[in-house]
Image: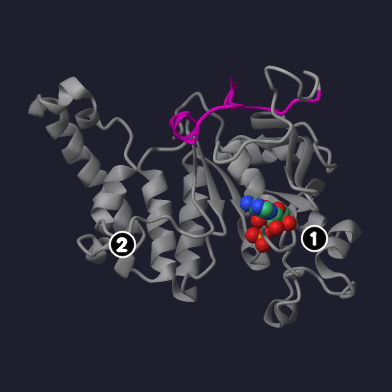
Amino acid sequence: MSNSTQKTAAEARAELKTVAQTPGAPKPDAILVVDNVVRDFGGNRAVDVDHLEVQRGVITALIGPNGAGKTTFFNLITGFDQPSSAKKAFGGPSADKAAKWSFNGKLLGNTAAASVAKSGMVRTFQLTKALSRLTVMQNMLLGAKDQRGESFLAAFVKPLWAAQEKANIAKAEDLLKRFKLYEKKEDLAGSLSGGQKKLLEMARALMSDPVMIMLDEPMAGVNPALTQSLLGHIQSLRDEGTTVLFVEHDMHMVRHISDWVVVMAEGRVVAEGPADTVMSDQAVIDAYLGAHHDTDLGDDSLLEEGAMDAPKKEKK
Ligand SMILES: Nc1ncnc2c1ncn2[C@@H]1O[C@H](COP(=O)(O)OP(=O)(O)OP(=O)(O)O)[C@@H](O)[C@H]1O
């Protein structure tokens, strides 16, 4: 969250005006810097990112056709998967070709997912991971950091964790109200609709006050009536100082809230820039649309046709 020494979101956005609109362009205040991240599945190179920087304090969208490698890229940098280009004790790529990435000034390669989350980079999943047999509130409390009851000594000293737990419950209630899930707090997470599970996952991710939140298709399955408020939540997170990186197929959402758009195709970053510029870039149109060259991305008729989804490559 922001403090007086941090830039405002408007200042962070204004800085983007100076950034070159080329793949891998350096950012004035990069929170995430990625180099040489490659992931092969058999003979299929799913991710091949030479260099990418994400500006702190803004909303960046990561877009690209089905199978472009967006989710795999999220998995790699959050420690849920390992790059094929990872540095190895013996053999492996030379130091200048080995995968390396830093978040908020800290090197993160070979870091387990839980430690990545502790460093402030917290993600949600395309297919939600809410724990079905726990209540909505229990799911929320699992997302909290500083759970003092977890420490062996503190677990036996109630005053050490009781106050913390109370604060966590109050925070969870507040977030559940924001995401219109408060009435469901005692229900099992498994009983929620797909869209509600997505909202729960986002609310749970916010329990740890992330420095950067990474959302994998936050809009998929969310009722249109909630779409506007979800967009509002994401923008207010940014305005409060949280960096947002999200993968999304809904081009209206991308146009509406992104300060910067990064386009992936066949594992590579092929374009980046402000939404309007990127979406009229011929390489992007080609990557998405194949034959539909004249059609603007974000065009309603196109969305209805579902023409933006290139055929999905089969997962092995
Ligand atoms: N566990 C896996 N085993 C084998 N291949 C995989 C695996 N995970 C992903 N892939 C392949 O890697 C490529 C990139 O997939 P990924 O899911 O990252 O794309 P994406 O851009 O997120 O697509 P979508 O928008 O459809 O979610 C695809 O060809 C996919 O089949």
- Write the residue at 20% across / 61% down: 186
Label at residue 134: none
Q: Secondary structure at mark 2?
A: helix
Q: Secondary structure at mark 1?
A: helix
Label at residue 279: 1
* Residue 94, quarter of picture: top right
First in sequence, mark 1 or 2: give its number: 2
For residue 63, above or below residue 87: below
The magenta segment is 97-119
Res 313 seen here = yes
x and y, in percent, of residue 64 in the image? 74, 58
**Amino acid type of the residue tagged 2 in the rendering:** Ala
Residue behind label 1 places its C-beta within 8 angstroms of ligand 1 = no
Q: How is the image coloured?
A: one colour
- Write the residue at 90% across / 74% down: 291
Give how far apart the Cα atoms at labels 1 and 2 are.
37 Å
Question: Quick check: 182 left or right of 311?
Answer: left
Question: Quick check: 252 left or right of 203?
Answer: right
**Amino acid type of the residue tagged 1 in the rendering:** Met
- Write the residue at 9% across / 27% down: 159
Q: Nearer the viewer, mark 1 or mark 2?
A: 2
The N terminus - image quarter:
top left
Q: Quadrant of ligand 1?
A: bottom right
How many marks can you see?
A: 2
x and y, in percent, of residue 312 in the image? 72, 66
